[in-house]
Image: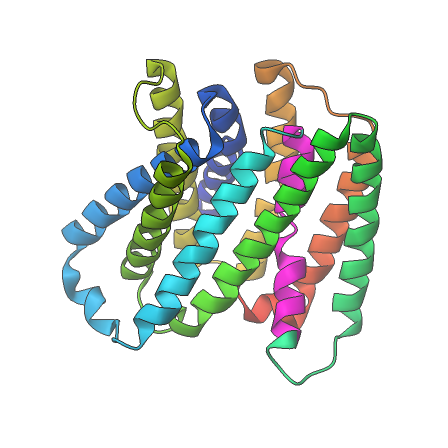
Amino acid sequence: MVYVWVGVGVVSVSLASIFIRLADAPPLTVAAYRMCIATVIVGVTAGIAGRGGFAAVRRADFLLLAGSGIFLAAHFALWITSLSHTSVASSVLLVTTTPVFVAIGAHFASPDKVGRLTALAVVVSVAGGIVIAAGDWAEGERHLLGDALALAGAVAVAGYLLVGRRVRRRIPTLPYITIVYAVAAVVLLAAAVGSGAPMLGLPAESYFWMAMAALLPQAVGHSLLNWALGYLPAVNVTLMVRAEPVLATLMAIPVLGEVPPWTVLPGGALLLLGVYIAVRSGEARRANV
């Protein structure tokens, strides 16, 4: 039954890129609303569950929690912006290469040499990225910019995970994500307002799809996946989440009328293989990615 709920979580997460495209609003506006709504949802849930878990948060933890939240804000700003420049398939495939960057980051954070599995994961993933970029090159420089933003979004998530794991072992899930989400929401709201991105006066449909992006992918999808980590090995959950780019690509065809270039198939296969190798490596598993 746990695997069924993981499946529901993966499908929910896969809808994020579709909802963001349907919102048809400036990227920073979408990112800010998504995180603000998600923060309210998890904050209310944490309040109902009781504030006892927040007692585990020490004053010294707030710097790491703030850093984790800033990385999360950067991820959403970069990735959501990428969807305005490149295809759903390319964007989601590239942003899910996070385990590769976590494995690399774990080595920089330790004196160990880069393991053979990690090196292989990097080589295979780079090859996949080159194939996808070659296909998007034919679509124009705008698509390549989107690819670069999605890849930068993956690096930002790796930072979020690597910084967060320093306190995640001790702080319960709800207090942790409530604080981190709140930091990310404040950063994104400030970025949206500061850049002049409209927060009011948008069509009702835009607000509906932004709310859906916060409710299903964020509140339902990520919550189910976090819950599943209490019953299944992290590597199992992570590998199931690798179905996200496949599902998102398939849904984008009928919903958005977006057929990706043929290079997404071989390039995506190489990227997913690289991610699989990274997940199987000790570095990514220790980071619970």
**Magenta stretch contains residue 75:** no
Q: Which residues are magenta?
A: 87-107
Magenta span: predominant SS is helix
Where residue 177 appears, x then y in whole percent? 34, 56
What residue appears at the point 79 percent right and 52 percent down from the top-left corner?
126
Eyeballing the image, is 17 above or below 77? above
What residue appears at the point 74 percent right and 81 percent down from the top-left corner?
113
Near-viewer residue (112 or 234): 112
Would residue 220 be visible to someone looking at this image?
A: no
Near-viewer residue (90 or 171): 90
Color style of the picture: rainbow
- Number of marks in the rendered image: 0
Where residue 280 appears, x then y in whole percent? 68, 63
Asked whether, in this view, residue 175 is left or right of residue 64, the answer is left
Q: Name the image quarter holding the C terminus.
A: bottom right
Q: Name the image quarter holding the N terminus.
A: top left
What residue appears at the point 53 percent right and 31 percent down from the top-left corner?
17
Eyeballing the image, is 101 above or below 212? below
Near-viewer residue (34 or 16): 34
Where residue 46 appears, x then y in whole percent? 21, 53
